[in-house]
Amino acid sequence: MKKIWVLTLGMFALGMDTYIVAGLLPDMGRAFHKNSAEIGQGVTVFTLFYALSAPIFSTILAKYSVKKTLLLALLTFSFANIITMISMNFTLYIISRCIAGLGAGLFSPMAVSSGGYLVEQKDKGKALAFIVGGMSVGTVIGVPAGLQLAQLINWRWAMGVIVLIGILAIFTTLIYLPNFKLPATPNLKERFSLFINPSVLSVVSVTICTAIASLGLYTYLSQVISEYLSINAVSLYLTAWGIGGLIGSFGVGFIIDKIKDTRYLILFILIALTISVLLIPILIKIQILSVIPFILWGAMGWATQAPQQHILLKHHSKQGSTSVALNSSVNYLGSALGAALGGLILAQGLNVKVLIYSAAAVLLVAILIQLRNIICGKNKVTND
């Protein structure tokens, strides 16, 4: 499992980098003389380039060994974070987040895909759980730790920690990961033809709405907390969200195995996620209960991916890995759209309640789409 830990370390760095900026928005804003809405566009471009780089570069680099591709991804990711750490102006910051997104988008799906080829059949499930779990652990542990460091010194030191973890992942990959290639991947034409398949479109439509609402709102969580409470309380609620994410990402697998039709599970998750978002303004000032919406939000938000992937793998087994990669890319595309729309709302000077209720409205759309999927049986199609 040593080889798996190498991949998990890289995913930890990705998880920390993906979600820490949400807590650093106020400090970064002061450094670049920008408001939170403008700094939040760093999340938009990161997740947008993450979404676009995965299908494009995984196809272009398919002829190279996995080890070389992962090293290139980690080098790109770490270099970009160094630029973020030392950037002295807003433009350089945005460019560095674009490059970081490219590296992250190349590393993540490649690490997940290669995990199953590094262990015996009996250990595949455990290996994939460790690799994917690395990102959620990076959120639960890495983000609060980085925010504490940022409060003690400044946000650049928090980014420096991500750089160090990335460099450590580079060296461990170089030393411990063997040279091997994955089976040939579909070309870009085949990938995009899958996207226009009606049954796939019905699944990823739910994914993109969920990401717009959940990850888009998360981007401005520090703004929500500072408006209701104090900026000093951000770490607590980010930790609560991350703990929920850990529970949701690991726990949903056990539920999937016990439910015959995963579409109903997704419907339940979406309803619970909507309720958690609506509970934020109601409970946030009640000390004992204030963290409950954030734990539930994190759990339900992180729990959406596995059931969606299960649906795609079940009904598109011949193109399973491609459809799962597409769903992952759409998830980050939704995050980019959510961050952009959230920034637009805040830029208009509107109250954060508008942000919260807008997220709930998008989730309602996702619920309606999922109800239609269940009623019309859009996912009950033959394998491609």
Image (spheres, rainbow, N blue to C red):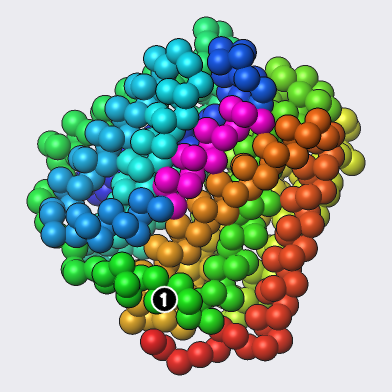
Q: Nearer the viewer, residue 165 or 186?
A: 186
The residue at the point 58 percent across, 76 percent down is 202
In the image, is residue 284 above or below residue 272? Answer: above
> Is residue 293 magenta-colored?
no
Dot 1 crowding, Cα within 10 Å, few <14, some 14–19, many 20+: some
Image quadrant in which the C terminus is located: bottom left
Q: Position of residue 36 (x, y in %)?
A: 66, 26
Query: How many numbered discs?
Result: 1
| Residue type, numbered disc 1 | Leu
Residue to which mark 1 is pinned? 194
Residue 251 in sight here: no
Q: Tell me if 143 is positioned left or right of 73 in this view.
A: right
In the image, is residue 185 above or below residue 359? Answer: below
Q: Which secondary structure class fits the magenta region best? A: helix
> Is residue 39 magenta-colored?
yes
The quadrant holding residue 172 is: top left
Q: Position of residue 57 (x, y in %)?
A: 28, 53
Q: Nearer the viewer, residue 342 or 171?
A: 342
In the image, is residue 123 above or below residue 358? Answer: below
The residue at the point 55 percent across, 46 percent down is 336
Kindly state the secondary structure of the residue where label 1 is placed. helix
User: For the magenta stretch, what is the residue range?
Assistant: 37-51
The quadrant holding residue 263 is: bottom right
Q: Position of residue 72 (x, y in %)?
A: 21, 40
The residue at the point 19 percent across, 63 percent down is 182
The residue at the point 54 percent across, 74 percent down is 201
Q: Position of residue 138 (x, y in %)?
A: 46, 36
Q: Tell me if 379 is positioned left or right of 375 in this view.
A: left
Q: Nearer the viewer, residue 242 or 84?
A: 84
